[in-house]
Image (cartoon, helix red, strand yellow):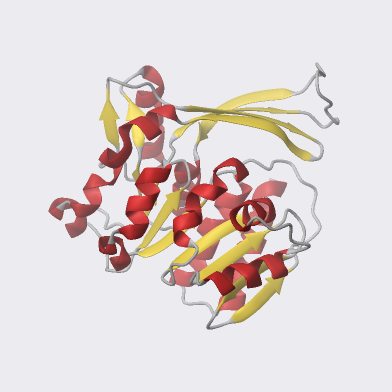
Amino acid sequence: MDCKIDAICVGSVLWDVIGRTNQSIRRGDDIGGFIKRIPGGVAFNIAQNLVNLEINACLLGFLGNDNAGIQLASYCQNLGINTDYIYRSDKFTTDNYLAIEDNEGVVAAIADAHSLESVGYEILKPLKNKQFNSSLKTNRLPLIVDGNLKSDLLNNLAADSFYEKFDLKLVPASPGKASRLAPFIKKGNVTLYLNLSEAQILCGINFSDTVSAAIELISYGVGKVIITNGQNKVSMASKATGVLSVTPPKIKVKRLTGAGDAFLAAHVKAEMLKYDPEKCLEFAVEKSAMYISE
């Protein structure tokens, strides 16, 4: 692609299979609803939202050379997402994600990111490639990394000073993978995007709200943290700003999967527009509210 890269998204690119019903689900229930298969993965979702906000996003991840991978690559390219540097292989199949949602949210989900985990460091190699770096618009670009990467790869990323040239932003991908971000909680040059459950797992503390969670994480030394909690208060904290909070508008929820990714992309866009920190938070809350109500 000819366009200079504005932001880099590292992590999962896969197919989402989402089953949703407007009823409440109990274990063992077999009820009617709707099932759809759509492109997904945390890195993909963020890249898609960035492109929708007119930001040239590049994906670093894995796609198999199977039909699923070929279809996903084509879909990304049609959206305008740069896939030139995605690692491709015949050895592994394209990953998948399965989720069940009811009227209260996500009931259960299974992420099969085994191929991404297996290829490991291969997906990061372009970051040290001269050709890739010549395509970056500026230094200090947002480098957004999701927690679907294996722990050892994230540990290496946290320890390598090379990545300090980027505006490093991390998102766990799920509560079950929140602990993988532990190497970053004392890094003063990173931003963590978490929901309240993920913050509790990462800290080993049950927080009453996002404010107390944000304060705790900043005390560890992390540069900036932003914590969401569904339609409850969203809080951001850094040493420079202290704690800022915004309450999302009350809306009718039509979808939930990917809401956090829409929030993160909007916050990145606001920062690029050089909004003040509180306005960045408000902009992200507004855009994510629009996303879940569509």
Q: Is residue 180 above or below residue 28?
A: below
Q: Quadrant of the C terminus?
A: top right
Question: How many numbered circles does the render carry?
Answer: 0
Q: Residue at x 63, y 51 (%)?
A: 201
Image location of residue 198, percent across then percent down: 63, 51
Whether residue 196 is visible: yes
| Left or right of 70 in this view: 114 | right
Viewer-proximal residue, 18 or 82? 18
Image location of residue 60, percent across then percent down: 33, 44
Image location of residue 75, percent across then percent down: 41, 33
Whether residue 282 is visible: no
- Residue at far left of view: 130
Q: Residue at x 25, y 62 (%)?
A: 162
- Residue at far front of view: 204
| Left or right of 41 in this view: 21 | right
Image location of residue 245, percent across then percent down: 70, 72
Q: Residue at x 54, y 57 (%)?
A: 264
| Left or right of 7 in this view: 278 | right
Q: Residue at x 30, y 61 (%)?
A: 163
Q: Is residue 229 above or below residue 104?
A: below
| Left or right of 190 in this view: 215 | right
